[in-house]
Image (tube, rainbow, N blue to C red):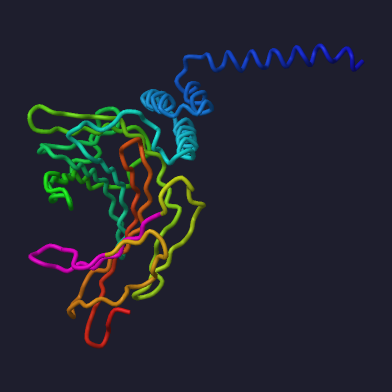
Amino acid sequence: MKKALLPLLMLSSVVNIAHAADWFKSSDALTQVHKHLLDNDLPQMFDSLVEVWQSNSSQSRENHLNELFDQALNKDCGKTLTKKTLPDWISSVVVKRHIIQSPGRDTFRVSIDVESEQSIQDITFEKWVDKVVSSDSEFMKESEVVNNASVSLYRKRYNLASQLDSGLYRLNVKGDGGNSWSTWIVLGEVSMRQQVRWASKDTWRIDKKDLLNPYCPLPKLEVGLYDYIDEQYEQVWGKSYESDYPMSLSSEDLPNDRYVLVVSMVHSRWQGDIAIEQAQTISKTYDISSEEELK
């Protein structure tokens, strides 16, 4: 009886292997995403992922794409997702999703920072297909980049009604002299593996929600004090930490006044040469007086 079953088992194995080979030969873009991910060919996987997002029409498929994208980040945090490099006239690009949690109110933003030696006329960020993420936006030239006077930082900030969804986006940068550059940006689900919250009046805590990706930079803690000057808030003190996070303000020599204390946790990854950040910020008023000093 066992001898009779052996040929059938062998035949079944051959059929299964042939079926798997046929499955990977399929021209379906989602199939190719799986194949390139298994082959560790991340640039091809990214190109196929863009194709799938362009035809995506179901929530279940969207969840599946986000899972595949997370797996791709487990190699090198996205550094080899794309082979395309920035043009010569752009030195860096940062795309940041941002949630700001103030007492009784949450604010959502997405900003795109571009450093360039050339003047930038505009930056746009659109969700596939040709849908501007928000009509409430601001474009500004921030300042010269430290240690490189020939490079300036340009920022486009969109104010959002809710957190930016995962999916496929198109980034466009228009420079002077007819120069322009655009690229696809894939955003996964918002995942704050470490979150900051208030513990008391002037202290905070960091909650660890999930294991960190060992191939990505450690989350960065940013702490700042803002003062209301000339009808706008300006940062008067700030410091960032990549480890040994403090849970309160250190002693600083600042005049007695009412400030806004801002604490942010920033997670980073890459899409090739492009940095993708997710920031969570908490803020509250903070009084400094002769009786109460920074600890």
Please identify the quadrant where the N terminus is shown: top right
Rendering coords of residue 115 (x, y %): 19, 42
In-image side of 244 versus 110 (left or right) = right
**Figure check: 59 above or below 150:** above
* Residue 42 within the magenta-colored segment of the rendering: no
Q: Quadrant of residue 227?
A: bottom left
Residue lying farthest front? 147
Q: Main secondary structure of the magenta part?
A: strand
Rendering coords of residue 97 (x, y %): 31, 47
Rendering coords of residue 118 (x, y %): 11, 37
**Figure check: 62 above or below 210:** above
**Figure check: 161 above or below 168:** below
Q: Residue at x 56, y 16 (%)?
A: 23
Residue lying farthest bottom? 291
Which range is magenta? 219-238
Please identify the quadrant where the C terminus is shown: bottom left
Q: Residue at x 13, y 50 (%)?
A: 144
**Figure check: 186 above or below 191:** above
